[in-house]
Image (cartoon, helix red, strand yellow):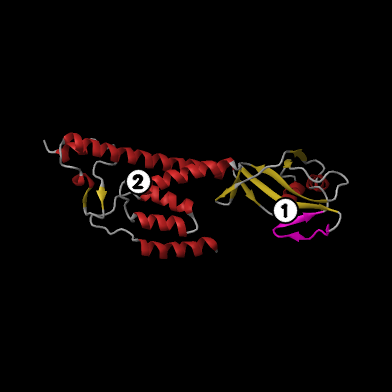
Amino acid sequence: MDPQHDARKHFPRGLAKPYDPRMGELVAERAPRTGVDAVRRWHDRQARWYVVRLAVLAGWLAMIVVVLVFGERPVPLSRLDSAVTSGSVSSVEVTPGLPRGAEGSTHQEAHWRQGLRGYVVEVRQVSGRGADGSEAGVRPVLTQDLGARLRADNPDVRVVRVGDRFTGTEMFGRRLPATFEGVRAVLGLASLVLLLFGPDPWRATRPAWGWLALTSGAPTYAALAFLALSGPTPGLSHPRPGARRLRAVWAVLLALVLYAFFAS
């Protein structure tokens, strides 16, 4: 029995003819030739990496959906004022301001939803010295409580007092609670393990994929590209036989171009 022919039967769908562009031959032809059992174990390992890679890719895609649906988009205070005045927003959650009669400053946030989209506004409330109503960086400075300001704009608006929220991570222009930072860290670590210990990647070398993630300024996009393009993925075509892979030097140049694009 031909061990290579027998080994191809042990790939899941989509791996029946895995291709390694660097070698210009079927990955199956690189399998050990010491017997059917050894070949079968080798292909089982390849199949497990295939499943792990698609699982991590699915995790990233699921997180992106959560970000787009439940994340809050930072907007200027004028956007909130306009929505409250027009009556298009009936309820706003506001974090605590300064106690009555107190002097100093504090950070306040307003959270609200319009349809499926969530929004957040950040301001700095000041009282006493320095309460000039000017801008502090990108946060407007208010001399009154944010909730009181909204009720003055529209007495019918419902202001719900909520505890301080720490939105610790931002993706695709949306802010999420700090707990999502842990989820992103786990997915990032899993992607790194695949890069370092998984099968030889397609379309770019390991160092090239690594440089794209480190220097492009968009590690999330780089991780998604690596997981989708570094091996067989349902719905995506395989590289043509003999195709060259992106090398580290060209990857650094490409990453610098991408960094300039995302930083602009």
* Residue 108 part of the magenta segment: no
In the rendered structure, the answer to whether residue 257 lies left or right of residue 95 reads left
Query: Residue 45: percent from the left, percent from the top?
Result: 29, 38
How many residues crowd mark 2 within 10 Å: few (<14), some (14–19), many (20+)?
few
Position of 88 compared to 16: left or right?
right
Q: Which disc number belongs to residue 77?
A: 1
Quadrant of the drawing holding the N terminus? top left
Q: Residue at x 43, y 43 (%)?
A: 190
Report if residue 236 is visible in the image. yes
Write the start and end of the magenta stretch as one range. 130-142
Which residue does the image show at 83% across and 47% down from the upper left? 152
Residue 96 located left or right of residue 43: right
Residue 10: quadrant of the picture: top left
Which residue type carries mark 2? Phe
Looking at marks 2 and 1 on the same chain, the residue that comes earlier in the sequence is marked by 1
**Is 146 in front, or is 153?**
146
Identify the residue position indicated by label 2 in the image. Answer: 197
User: Label 2's element?
Assistant: helix
Q: Residue at x 76, y 52 (%)?
A: 124
Point out residue 64 in the picture as x, y percentages from the top left corner. Answer: 51, 44
